[in-house]
Image (tube, rainbow, N blue to C red):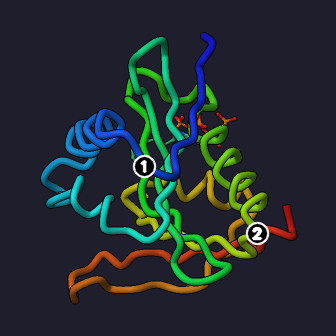
Amino acid sequence: MEFAFAIHNKDIPDSAIEEMARLVSETFGEQYPEPNFPERVLSKFKPMVVLAKNADDVVGFKLGYERWQGTFFSWLGCVRPEYRRQGIARELLRRQHQWCKEQGYEKILTNSRNSFPEMLILNIQEGFQITGTDVDGGEPPPSILFSKLLKDD
Ligand SMILES: CC(C)(COP(=O)(O)OP(=O)(O)OC[C@H]1O[C@@H](n2cnc3c(N)ncnc32)[C@H](O)[C@@H]1OP(=O)(O)O)[C@@H](O)C(=O)NCCC(=O)NCCS
């Protein structure tokens, strides 16, 4: 199947935010809810999303924002279950990293968890180093912290 990929940074369209919110709630549901997701996207400094589309349907995305000068934080991403294992997440990640490089970012940070093993595998395959863990809000399981220098790409 052929998928189309689109990058939005300045003025992410409302329709894209709505599609992401739908996927986030379907994917992370009650286990890891993302309350006020649309407002939180708009509150981020220099947000950027890569969307994967099958015709007009958003089937996956990867969203991040500038953490501080020179460093981009890859916040959240997912692929609809029926479209998984076709290389979409890897392509989203590579397009995000390429865009970050072109924008002059030197480093990308991201977090994941043991409960998302596919993402852990992909992060390691794509050159992230594990730099530590963080117990958000005091509740285990901890987040696993990753970092990647873009010059290593
Ligand atoms: C993680 C996720 C985005 C991966 O999406 P995807 O499009 O299926 O991933 P890809 O097809 O690009 O797979 C890339 C690689 O990841 C690994 N991988 C992906 N799914 C896997 C699985 N079920 N079992 C083992 N390895 C897997 C493989 O190494 C794969 O490469 P390969 O297919 O060439 O072997 C998707 O599984 C998802 O949305 N999961 C739920 C949400 C989530 O975990 N988000 C991240 C939160 S931090």
Q: Name the residue tied to disc 1.
A: 11
Q: Nearer the viewer, residue 123 or 10?
A: 10
Is the residue 44 above or below the residue 36 in the image?
below
Q: Residue 13: x and y, percent?
A: 37, 39
Separation of disc 1 and disc 2 at Cα? Answer: 20 Å
State yes or no: discs 1 and 2 in contact (Cβ < 8 Å). Answer: no
Label 2 residue SS: loop
The residue at label 1 has a CB less than 8 Å from ligand 1: no
Q: Amino acid at mark 1?
A: Asp
Q: Viewer-nearest of labels 1 and 2?
A: 1
Q: Amino acid at mark 2?
A: Gly
Give the total of numbered labels.
Answer: 2
Q: Give me the residue at 44% from left, 35% from top.
A: 79
Q: Nearer the viewer, residue 40 or 151?
A: 40
Q: Residues within 10 Å of mark 2 (few under 14, many from 20)?
A: few
Q: Give me the residue at 59% from left, 22% from top.
A: 4
Mark 2 or mark 1, which is nearer the start of the sequence?
1
Is the residue 92 above or below the residue 88 in the image?
below
